[in-house]
Image (cartoon, helix red, strand yellow):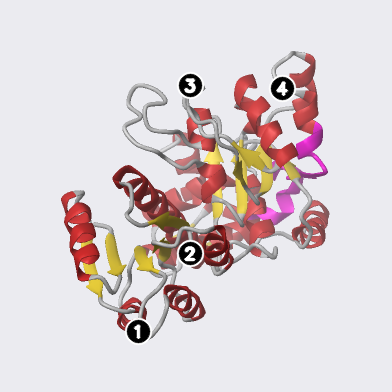
Amino acid sequence: MAKLIIVDDEKSIRGALRDILEYEGYEVDEAKDGEEGLDMIIKSSYDVALCDIKMPKMNGLDVLLKAGEAGKETQFVMISAFGNVENAVEATKRGAFDFVTKPPDLNRLLGAVRNALDRSKSVQQTRLVKNQTLQSSDIVGQSPLICRLRDAISRVAVTEARILITGANGSGKELVAKQIHERSSRATMPLVEVNCAAIPGELIESELFGHEKGAFTGATGRRIGKFEQANGGTLFLDEIGDMSLSAQAKVLRALQESKIIRVGGDKDIKINVRVIAATNKDLRKEIQNGNFREDLYHRLSVIVLAVPSLAERRDDIPLLINKFLNDLATEYGAPVSRMDKAAMDHLKKLSWSGNVRELRNVVERLMIMCGDKITLDDVQFYTNLGL
């Protein structure tokens, strides 16, 4: 259940907001002034804070600033009876997610809360993934192709250039995108991933740009899309070669103008997003076949990074196997399995059409089925049977 806090010196406002939010199913706490609110936010974990600006002891903008300085990831929706542009701009500069005027319109307020919760979940998921992969997200290998790729990542990560990552399925394109984000100036902001091949064509625009209430059947409320969720951070468009031409046109506009329009909306929304795209297709051939826009290709491919297949770097296979054995032992809470040289040599000779992803799956299978020691006989038996 999402946990919210209302920070407002007016008891009647707190009570009215609490009734509305609890009816929507949220867990809600209250604070009667800025000092109490800041203390509660620092000591607890809130997804969203609805915070008045003008309050005794400490104003809402200072609460927002000090919560950020304390490392809290609470998303702030500022509320004020003084709905002027200066307040809204200052709140945004200090990190507020949204700004609502008093008395708040119910639909506007609930929309702001839902959108702030979406952003909160995105930030939390990014932190979780980053913590889980902190020690295991390095690109493993000493082959010339991998050394060259690592050098290229170091060079481009610190820039704002758009990047197109190419490579076969399972070769590690997503890992490259994560490395770029983690080494960039946007590393503290969300990395939002979209698998364009996994989303039906009729839903991809809503997924990317969000939608307004009533935009289509089933759109019961406003929803922010991946571009807005990634604002200030990085948007990773995986398998972009599978995106519909209609969505491609809107992505092109977003890149050209740094703004989007939600499905069913008519308001431009400014965005600050670095886009990294990836594909397993030859986009130049897709352009010739009329399946991909040439202008979008040139927008995305300021830098092109090619991820080699596993067959192109077979000498890295023993390093990858040992990494996977150690990672899996930690994941399963089990002793580290060891694989003898003959077994590794045999694995180096296989075709690996599924690349690094397939290799990891095979190593996991062998660790589960064979235990502490993995021999050549084990490898031949379990790879030949495909168990």
The residue lying at 33 percent from left, 72 percent from top is 45
* Nearer to the camera, 24 or 308: 24
Q: Is disc 4 in contact with disc 2, using a CB cutoff of under 8 Å?
A: no
Q: Secondary structure at mark 3?
A: loop
State which quarter of the image contains the C terminus: top left
Distance CA(mark 4)–CA(mark 3): 17 Å
Residue 366, position as x, y percentages in the image: 44, 51
* Nearer to the camera, 218 or 35: 35
Comparing labels 2 and 3, the label whose residue is closer to the camera: 3
* Nearer to the camera, 102 or 328: 102
Residue 217, position as x, y percentages in the image: 34, 21
- The amino acid type found where label 1 is placed reads Glu
The label on residue 35 is: 1
- The amino acid type found where label 4 is placed reads Phe
Distance CA(mark 1)–CA(mark 2): 28 Å
Q: Is disc 1 in contact with disc 3, using a CB cutoff of under 8 Å?
A: no
The residue beneath circle 3 is 202
The residue lying at 57 percent from left, 53 percent from top is 343
